[in-house]
Image (cartoon, rainbow, N blue to C red):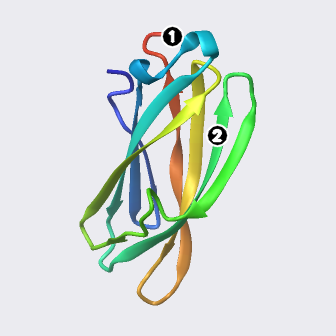
Amino acid sequence: MNNPSPYTAVTDDVSVSVVSQYLPNQSDADKQQYVFSYTISIENLRSTPVQLLSRRWLITDADGERSEVEGEGVVGQQPTIAPGQTYTYTSGSVFNTPVGTMQGQYQMIAPNQQQFWIDIPVFRLALPNILN
């Protein structure tokens, strides 16, 4: 198990927690392909529902190479999260280096049609025991 403690950020009464995991069976170090999964839990701490509209990511590998990704929803969904509820999903990323980071934001909308951005905390994706 790597990174058993979640990385967490709270913005505008919405909490985002991330736990990442290295996937050795899908990775190939000889080809510089390091595959990671990450599980994100979005908890609505508000008294009204919120809906996730879109996401934007900043992905950085150990060589400092950066890429940005934007798109609608997450894993093909734009979930509405009721007060006190949590939406959880798992996705993945492939790096050319054994260590990298991801961070970003989700665009949300409240019942009054007010749109706002919440932070996805910076989290590390790394081979187990590579960083001691």
* Kind of residue at disc 1: Ile
Report, in whole angstroms, how far the alpha carbon at label 2 lies from the one at label 1.
Answer: 19 Å
For disc 2, the marked residue is 59
Above/below status of 47 relative to 121: below
* Kind of residue at disc 2: Ile
Label 1 crowding class (10 Å Cα cut-off): few <14, some 14-19, many 20+?
Answer: few
What residue is rendered at 66% in x and 28% in y?
A: 61
Q: Single out the residue that lies furthest toward the left.
A: 84
What residue is rendered at 56% in x and 12% in y?
A: 29
Q: Quadrant of residue 3?
A: top left
**Marks 2 and 1, the one that precedes in the sequence:** 2
What residue is rendered at 52% in x and 13% in y?
A: 131
Whole-percent x, y for residue 83 in the image: 27, 73
Label 2 crowding class (10 Å Cα cut-off): few <14, some 14-19, many 20+?
Answer: many
Q: Is residue 50 left or right of residue 117?
A: left
Whole-percent x, y for residue 30 in the image: 60, 9
Q: Quadrant of residue 101?
A: top right
**Which element is circle 2 on?**
strand
Above/below status of 35 relative to 39: above
Whole-percent x, y for residue 108 in the image: 49, 71
Whole-percent x, y for residue 6 in the image: 37, 37
For disc 1, the marked residue is 130
**Which element is circle 1 on?**
loop
What residue is rendered at 24% in x and 67% in y?
A: 84
